[in-house]
Amino acid sequence: MTTLLAVRGLSKSFGALHVTQDVSFDVLQGEILGVIGPNGAGKTTLFGLLAGNITPSAGTVAFAGEDITAAPAHERARRGLARTFQVPRPFGHMTVFENLKVAARFGGNLAEDEANAWVERVLAMTGMQGQSEQLAGRLPLLMRKRHELARALAMKPRLMLVDEVAAGLTDQEVNQFIALVQAIRKSGVTVIWVEHVMKTMLTATDRLLALHSGRVLALGRPQEVFNHPDVRRVYLGA
Amino acid sequence: MNEDLYWMFIDVANGLLSGSMLGGYYAVIAIGLALNFGVMRLVNLAHGDWLILAAYLAVAFLSMANVSPFWTLLLVVPVMYVIGYVIQRVMLNRVSVQAAERRGMSASFGLMSPLLVTFGMSIVIGQGLLAVFDSNAMAIRNELSFDAIRLGEDLTVSTLRLIFFGIALLMLALVQFFLHGTHMGRAIRAASDDPEIAALMGMNANKVYAVASGISLATAGVAGVMIGMSRSFQPFDGPTFLLIAFGVVILGGLGSMVGALVGGLILGIVQVLAGTYFGPSAQLVAGYILILFVLAVRPQGLFSR
């Protein structure tokens, strides 16, 4: 398998606070890489560093073989890197269709007609056909979460960074989202998925990356990482 | 008695009519300020000076070509667009809320510094106009200044103001269509909603802001020509019009296009009716009392989203 994203020695500190320290890992083309870690482990900061809305203090990020460490967020998006947020952030005064279309036209570099057709497909794929003309700011929470994924998908990304969709959902709803993320992967998108719910991570990912205090604790198959003594110590105190 | 009633009706009708016409003119003066604030959260203290600059541009153009003042729009509007685009790109984008946050400074710094920068710009524009055109009052000559259309025996409306009103409606419709019906318009709305997300969607927010700022000054171009055609002006008249624009935007709600029209109409009608019943000096006072009242009761404006 080829490497899509290569992270080397990535660090970020805010003053004396080191949120990310010397983090290195590869993301393979077509996989779902889960990222776990307790609160404050640096998961969200890692996403910010990868998506380009936080600039690193040190280290490099290469995407599809090209160094993007210095590239601003909008350029990374156009290269095929999409990010979602744990608390969905739709353009609230625009309709669902408009939200997705903006993503398709800019991030996806699609022309007007292509964008319209692609957005229709994304709406169908994410089960949001009926919501197309709804103002995104008025969607109920579950739909907002879907919308967050749908808009990222509308960018035709090569790599999608998914930030905690399962938080606060019932088992049944979580299963729907697992199916959705897997469908997204099946359509050819590589996924990095941050989640607190361990069960989700064990069943839905190909590999797991465990972070603790901004450092990589373990990286490997989900079960191996879960059974890793350091991980068990951090999570269970055992 | 019957005649008293008739004249009362005529007074009110005239007040409403010419107030509305004045309101359309006010709306055009305010669109640019509303757009600037609505999209970029930027309070442009130089807005009034840009209007005056546009009026002088029209004067300069007319000194070279002897045509109807309306033709000056063909030059003034694109020139103002380019000025707006460039100023935003090379200057205002560097001091925006987003730029401050990128440099790790507090957002309030990003709110303060554009105020200082546009205040400085206001001084530079005024002094620049003084240096080039001297302080004599200017006006854009036109044949319509004293024309009026008679709607009834005692009911008239100024031709120029009626044309301005038509232009105001057209401009608001165009801006509204642009924001909702075009690719760039949607981008502007998205970037105004959440610039960080807009960037993550692949948008270069700085470029989008530059276009928005260009459009804002293009509307100021139209307003400037209107001002020049309706009254005389001098290099330092900008703040007077900034105040009008602020009034309209406060009434209508910051950043709302429909609000700009309604705010303009309310301000215009109140001023004219106050002038009719309490004399010319009441005209300005009534406007400001209304603005203070709205600020106290509904500070977000009547049409704020």
Image (cartoon, coloured by chain):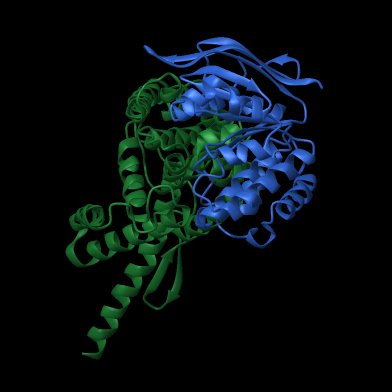
Colour of chain A in the image: blue
Residue B285 located left or right of residue A95: left
**Residue sitting at 63 percent across and 44 percent down?**
A149
Can residue B86 be seen in this snapshot? no
Which chain is painted in green?
Answer: B
Q: Where is residue B24 in the image (x, y as percent from the top left)?
A: 43, 57
Residue A119, above or below B139: below
Q: Position of residue B290 (x, y in %)?
A: 24, 57
> Which of A68 and B295 lies nearest the eye of the viewer?
A68
Residue A117 located left or right of residue B68: right
> Which of B62 and B288 lies nearest the eye of the viewer?
B288
Q: Position of residue A144 (x, y in %)?
A: 55, 51
Residue B294 located left or right of residue A134: left
**Residue sitting at 19 percent across and 54 percent down?**
B285
**Residue sitting at 19 percent across and 57 percent down?**
B282
Q: Where is residue A170 in the image (x, y as percent from the top left)?
A: 54, 53
